[in-house]
Image (tube, grey):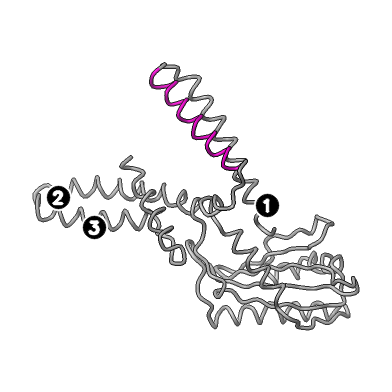
Amino acid sequence: MIFLSPLLLSLVLTRAKPEKLLVPPLYIQAITFAEFTAFYWVKYPSDVWPALVFLGVYFYVSGFVLTPIATYLLGVAVKTEDFLSCSFSSGADPEKFRIILATEKFRENLSIVRDTSEDTEEPYRFRGRNGTLNFVGRVTSSPDHHNSLLDLAFFDTTRYYVLPRSDVLKEYANQKTSYLRDILSRSGFNLDERSSESAETLVHLTMSRMQGVVPLLGNLSRLGWLKVFAFLGAMVWLAFDALVLKDITTSAGLIVLILVTVAFELRSVKTTSRYG
């Protein structure tokens, strides 16, 4: 329980102020280590170095292990105003976009790291990244099916949060949109700016993708909550089976099976929430 206390504290502090930064267990452990160092230095100066070596290793290892778990559970701290978004219309249909952006030199110059080019269904989606700078794009057919609508959202991330909008992000957005205009014009298509309402929808969908498991619990259906309570009930029974009935082998096997099932369940929930 002591080992997990930084994770629990991270969950509480972050959820208390979700609009602020994620509070990683590694930072909590660093502060705790500093406090222990001051205590031992004053109270036990002759034995301080062996204690500091042991505590330093313990706090670092525990913080290093628990921080990815906290990030998975809490997601990334993000606000809508941290994004830059824009929308365009083009005479190139979504399939033409797929073909153009499948060209290797264009993909490299746009730094596209993932797309749905192998999926023939709309919308066509793609994502690019240069270091901490990211963008997501979505191409759909216009209501009259004569043009395509291109939505773009740009953002700058760190490990725990999305950075506020900056001049660097604006320059990055200008570079990518200018290059998209250029490669489309080579194929005889224009890229005309339009109202950014649909791009704002893309921003919200991207933000939902950054959510962790804990925020997603607020969107659970009755069936989802039934699964949660069934999981907790199963874990209580397995603890009873292992500690009281001493059937450790069966309990260990069932715990592994349950955890694998939960992992696939959470993965499916997060996948369906990525782009709606």
* Residue 165 is a magenta residue: no
- Determine whether 14 is above or below 249 in the image: below
Mark 3: few/some/many CA within 10 Å (<14, 14-19, 20+): few
Q: Which disc number belongs to residue 48?
A: 2
Q: Residues within 10 Å of mark 2 (few under 14, many from 20)?
A: some
| N-term mark: 3 or 1 | 3
Mark 3 or mark 2: whose residue is earlier in sequence: 3
Residue 240 found in image quarter: top left
Residue 26: x %, y % from top left: 37, 55
Q: Is residue 207 left or right of residue 51?
A: right
Residue type at the position of mark 1: Thr
Question: Residue 1 versus residue 228: which sits nearer the camera?
Answer: 228
Residue farthest to the front?
A: 222
> For the residue marked with disc 2, what is the amino acid?
Val
Gap between marks 3 and 1 measured at Cα: 42 Å
Q: Is residue 53 left or right of residue 119?
A: left
Residue depth check, mark 1 versus mark 2: number of the one nearer the observer = 1
Q: Residue at x 45, y 29 (%)?
A: 236
The residue wearing badge 3 is: 34
